[in-house]
Amino acid sequence: MINIFKKGFTLIELLIVIAIIGILTALVTTNLSGARSRARDTRRKSDLRSIEQSLRLYYNDAKKFPTDDGSDNISIASWGSPFAVGSTIYMSSLPKDPISTATSTVTYKYDSLGDDKYLIIAVLENASDPDIAESQLKCTSNYSSYIGVKTTTDYLVCAQ
C-alpha cells in the first residue's frame, strides 16, 4: 500500500540542507573579504604610483621634491586636497587610504629625505603580498632613514 500522507521532507533532511547552505555561505563570505582587502591593496599601490608621478612633475619644475611637514604629510598639500602650486596643478586631489571614512581619516605617509629623495608609505592588508618585500628592497636606503613607525606590511615608493 502506498503512503499518501508522506508529501514533505523530514526534519533531518531539512537540517542537512540548512547546514550545507551555512557552510557554503561561510566559505563565500571569507573569500569575498579577502578579495576586498586585495582590491584595497591594489588601489593603494595605484595611488602611490599616481603620487609618484605628480611628485616627479613637481621636481621637474622646482628642481627638488616638496618637504614633509613633520607629521608624514607633504608640506605644500594635504591629503584629500589638490596638490598644486600657483596655477600649476600636479594632482587634482592627493588620495587618502581606501579605508578612510568621513569620521576616521587614514592617509599615506610622506617623508622628505632631502631635495632629491622622498619616501611614500602605504600599509597593505595582505601581509603575504610579494610586492612588499620587493618595494622594501628597492627603497632600502631611504626606508632605513625613515624615523616613523615601521611595519612588516609597509609598501614603499621612493625616489631613485
Image (tube, grey):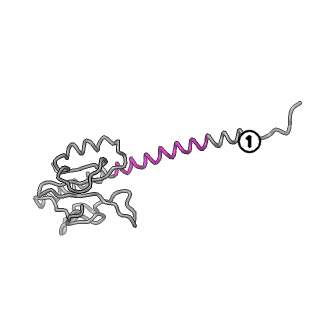
Image quarter (top left, top right, bottom left or bottom right) of the N terminus:
top right
Is 41 positioned to the left or the right of 115 in the image? right
The residue wearing badge 1 is 11
For mark 1, give the secondary structure. helix
Which residue is the extreme one toward the top? Answer: 1
Which residue is the extreme one toward the bottom? Answer: 86
Q: Position of residue 156 (x, y in %)?
A: 25, 49
Q: Please provide the residue range marked out in magenta.
A: 20-43
Against 33, is 69 above or below?
below
Q: Residue at x 71, y 38 (%)?
A: 13
Q: Nearer the viewer, residue 127 or 102?
A: 127
Q: Position of residue 155 (x, y in %)?
A: 28, 49
Q: Residue at x 82, y 38 (%)?
A: 6
Where residue 16 sits, quadrant-wise, is: top right
Where residue 7 sits, quadrant-wise, is: top right
Q: Residue at x 19, y 65 (%)?
A: 88
Q: Nearer the viewer, residue 53 or 68?
A: 68
Q: Residue at x 12, y 57 (%)?
A: 114
Examine the structure image and report whether residue 69 is included in the region drawn in magenta: no
Is 40 positioned to the left or the right of 25 in the image? left
